[in-house]
Image: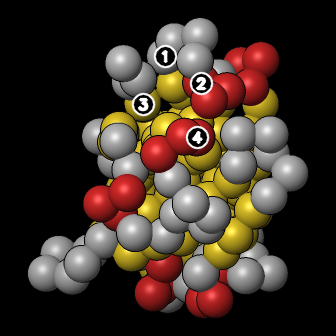
Amino acid sequence: QVQLVESGGGLVQAGGSLRLSCVASGRTFVSYNMGWFRQTPGKEREFVAVISWSGVRTDYTGSVKGRFTISRDNAKNTVYLQMNSLKPEDTAVYYCAAVNLYGSTWPPTAGDAYDYWGQGTQVTVST
């Protein structure tokens, strides 16, 4: 069982930065690939970024490449999403998610591949 809790969302002006954090419970955190997704009302949940259990492999959706960086600290059971050069279109609820290492293929970009989800944190980017 894995529980995920996001934090770090808020209101920021376009061009600004935020760092999202997701703390996972349990000693088995290292066994999971960790992803970030985002969703706006009326739209499908969108893949943003994923990081492998080791932190060596990462993947991003094209719209955030060069601006967002995903990282993890397994000793702290935490995954991060550093978001720079934020744009109004980045406004969404951001969710972290975990997919078991042995139940996924790389890169897992489909939301239904993930086993556990956090509650979400709101990111609002103003003009």
Q: Earlier in the sequence, mark 3 or mark 2?
A: 3
Q: Amino acid at mark 1?
A: Ser
Q: Amino acid at mark 2?
A: Phe
Q: Where residue 73 is drawn, which disc sits there?
A: none
Q: Label 2: which residue? A: 29
Q: Is residue 18 visible?
A: no
Q: Element type at marker 3?
A: strand
Q: Give the Cα distance between marks 3 and 2.
A: 13 Å
Q: Label 3: which residue? A: 5
Q: Label 4: which residue? A: 101
Q: In this rendering, which labeled residue sits more in front, label 3 or label 1?
A: 1
Q: Give the Cα distance between marks 1 and 4.
A: 16 Å
Residue at x 67%, y 27% (from the top left corner): 30
Q: Residues within 10 Å of mark 3 (few under 14, many from 20)?
A: some
Residue at x 41%, y 23% (from the top left corner): 2
Q: Where residue 25 is drawn, which disc sits there?
A: 1
Q: Earlier in the sequence, mark 1 or mark 4?
A: 1
Whether pointer 1 and pointer 2 mark residues with C-beta atoms closer than 8 Å, the reply is yes
Q: Position of residue 84 (x, y in %)?
A: 73, 70
Q: Earlier in the sequence, mark 4 or mark 2?
A: 2
Q: Earlier in the sequence, mark 3 or mark 1?
A: 3
Q: In this rendering, which labeled residue sits more in front, label 1 or label 4?
A: 4
Q: Amino acid at mark 3?
A: Val
Q: Element type at marker 1?
A: loop
